[in-house]
Every structure is written in structure tokens, then in C-alpha cells.
Amino acid sequence: MKKFYVLMAALLMAAAATAQDGPKNAIKVNPLSLGVSTINVSYERVVTARSTFQLGVYYTGYKFTDTKWTGFGITPEYRIHMGQEESAIEGFYIAPFLRYQNLKMTSPSFSNDVNAENKSTLTTFGGGGVLGRQWVWGKFALDIFGGPAYNAGNISYEDTSDSEVEGVNRFKGFTLRFGVSLGLGF
């Protein structure tokens, strides 16, 4: 029994020595995405003393001119924190990320039928990297980030017109990813 107590005390001391102050998790929303009819939520978890993993998901109902986009995206991201902050979830970071998007598009058809619509699906896969800074004050988190991204994908058309859908290039090729996220750490 004495060995058990010694082992438990050693484990507790090791855990206390490696434990950091501050939150180990954060749930955040990007309020800028609301401006384009999108809800963007992310969950971040401490992995090591200087790295975190974040998984972001979004749903959009964005309308650009006469084209309506509805769908979702998933963005896994590994963050490498540069400084020695109180918590691994806080400070400057660089983060490579991947992104998968599946978007349904509806736009008016310019055929003789007034009520006709072009319907198609855009599926993209890409990635990139961001630089950012995250602050944590108690339970409140503020995250500002930005960087380049590249998405490749294809469009499948519901009809046989294969006409280019307006605005599709906003989701393909080289783009910039940026945002401001607000959330709670725990």
C-alpha cells in the first residue's frame, strides 16, 4: 500500500509540475462572418505546452448578386505558439490548416423560362497558413488571425448547361483567410 501512495504522490507532483495556468480549451465564434450570412464556430484544445489544435466549422447562406450559396466547411488547424505566455492557448502563433467546403449554388437561368434556375454543387479542398495572436483574460478569449490559402475543387451541375456560376472564383484558387474570433476559455 505504501508503494501505491508513493506512486500517486509522484504522479500528482509530475502533473502539477507540467500543468499550466489558464484555460486548456476555448470555444469561439467569428462575428465578422455574420456579415456574409455565415455562422463560424471553432473549438481549440491545448496539445502541448506550446501547441494547440483547433477545429472550425461553418454554415453559410450567403447571397452574392443573384447567386445563393448554402453549405458548410470544416477547417482543422494546428497552432504553434511562439511565446512563453501563462497558457499554451495564449500568445502569437503560426498555424497550418486544411479546409473542406461543400456549397450548393442556385442562380437564375437566362433561358426562355422565367422561373428557371441553375443549380450546382461546389466541392473544394485546400489549405494554407495563418499568423495570429490570441489574448485570454480570465475566461474571455480574443483571437485575430490572417494569411494565405489555396482551394482546388470542382463543380457539378444539376442541369446540362455547364454554364459558369457567378461568384464561383471567390471559393477557388488563392485567397486570403482572416478573422477575429471571440470566445470563452475553460
Image (cartoon, rainbow, N blue to C red):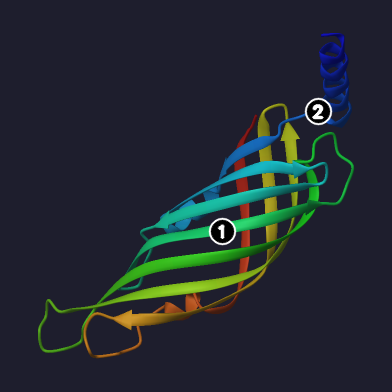
Front one among 17 and 36: 17
Give the position of the N terminus as an image quadrant: top right
Say what amino acid the circle numbered 1 marks: Thr
Q: Secondary structure at mark 2?
A: loop
Q: Residue furthest left?
A: 113
Give the position of the C terminus as an image quadrant: top right
Q: Residue at x 86, y 39 (%)?
A: 85
**x then y, percent, for residue 138:** 72, 26
Vertical arrangement, residue 151 with respect to residue 179, above or below: below
Quarter of the image for residue 66 reads bottom left
Front one among 116 and 42: 42
Say what amino acid the circle numbered 2 marks: Asp
Structural distance between the alpha carbons of marks 2 and 1: 27 Å
Q: Residue at x 30, y 77 (%)?
A: 120
Category of crowding for the residue at label 2, using alpha-carbon neighbours closer than 10 angstroms: few (below 14), some (14–19), many (at least 20): few
Front one among 99 and 60: 99
**x then y, percent, for residue 34:** 46, 51
**x then y, percent, for residue 112:** 11, 89
Quarter of the image for residue 89 reads top right
Quarter of the image for residue 126 reads bottom right
Category of crowding for the residue at label 1, using alpha-carbon neighbours closer than 10 angstroms: few (below 14), some (14–19), many (at least 20): some
The first of marks 2 and 1 along the sequence is 2
* Numbered tag placed on residue 75 in the rendering: 1
Q: Secondary structure at mark 1?
A: strand
Q: Residue at x 51, y 58 (%)?
A: 74
**x then y, percent, for residue 102:** 41, 67
Vertical arrangement, residue 70 with respect to residue 16, above or below: below
Q: Is residue 173 left or right of residue 36?
A: right
* Numbered tag placed on residue 21 in the rendering: 2
Vertical arrangement, residue 98 with respect to residue 21, above or below: below
Q: Residue at x 15, y 79 (%)?
A: 116
Assess whether mark 1 and mark 2 are in contact (beta carbons under 8 angstroms): no
